[in-house]
Image: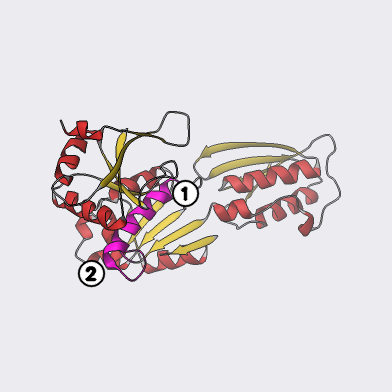
Amino acid sequence: MKTIDLSGKPCPIPVIEAKKALAKQGGQKILFKVDNSATVKNLNKMADACGYEFSFTEHGPGVFEVIIGGGEKGSVEPMNEDELPFVCCNSQAENIVVTIGSKAMGKGSEELGRILIKSFIYSLTELPIPPKYLILFNSGVFLAVEGANTIEDLKRLKEKGTEILSCGTCLDYFKLQDKLAVGTVTDMYGTTEKMVSAGKLINI
Amino acid sequence: MEYIITFKNTNHAIQAEQFLIERKIPLGVLPLPSQISAGCGICLRIPPQEIKAALLALTNLDIKILGVYTKANPRGTGSAIFTEITNWSRLMD
């Protein structure tokens, strides 16, 4: 069976490429590798709309193998891209990036801001779809170091699938390199790359 | 299970948080859950083994505790259940 790796491609490209590949193969089965559940759902909708058989296997977080092709009806007339029966908002919702550049939320009162940010981090843990990344920079890194009472909520967020990243330069500046209690360290390239590829970027 | 303490206003919540942090009582902050109608927008959550110490400590402050609740997350359900403890002063015994 032919294998096509569609991981890393933003929605709706995987669905468009899969549809074209299937048409080229005359509807014969193809194995597609994808990296998120939204793409699996969208491929499923495309397969149903085109009359292909569909199955998928999840091999781990972000590792999916989807097999599409065959089916009684076989290939149906290819649709225009704007007629594809799927929405991309799932994909967008699954790529939320939250950046926190301060240990206080908002301006006006530092004291108020410090408690608001804790309240905000807790409420992130209650979201049905947690952010993909939470990036802490400048004094925001204080939220992830030993002694902060946000650690427990950040750990919970991490368990729910959010990757917690702290700016290494900032930890260095505040002499907190050895105090990071949750998540890992990132640099400006990593931060920038995640910001520009975000489905939604929420900057606090 | 953990305890939730609500306050009359945000200033009281901030004072209480700082006071408990200084006394090394572990706690978390959360927005007032929508299931709890009374209180300011910020409340504190306290592990069960610390609730007595936390409430005793807060009696030293000139602030009003509006309510104390238990927060439980039953298995298989997404949302937490909050139960008000009407006679919460007994938790200090």
Please identify, in this view, whether the residue under mark 1 or under mark 2 is nearer the observer. 1
- Callout 1: chain: A
Q: Which residue is mark 2?
A: A173
Alpha carbon separation for disc pair 1 and 2: 29 Å
* Foreground pick, A17 / B18: B18
Q: Which residue is found at the position 50% from the left and 45% from the top?
A: A128
Q: Secondary structure at mark 2?
A: helix
Is A193 inside the magenta-drawn segment? no
Q: Which stretch appears magenta?
A: A102-126
* Foreground pick, A96 / A44: A96
* Foreground pick, B30 / B8: B8
Tell me whether the residue at label 1 lies in contact with that at label 2, contact meaning CB atoms closer than 8 angstroms: no
In the image, residue A25 lies at what x, y percent? 78, 47
For residue A47, what is the image quadrant?
top right
Is A104 inside the magenta-drawn segment? yes
Give the dominant element type of the magenta stretch: helix, strand or loop.
helix
Q: Quadrant of the C terminus of chain A?
A: bottom left
In the image, residue B79 lies at what x, y percent? 46, 37
In the image, residue A86 lies at what x, y percent? 71, 50
- Callout 2: chain: A
Residue A146 visible from this viewpoint: no
* Crowd around label 2: few <14 · some 14–19 · many ≥20 (10 Å): few
Q: Which residue is found at the position 25% from the left and 37% from the top?
A: B47
Q: Which residue is mark 1?
A: A130
Q: Amino acid at mark 1?
A: Pro
Left or right: A69 in relation to B81 = right
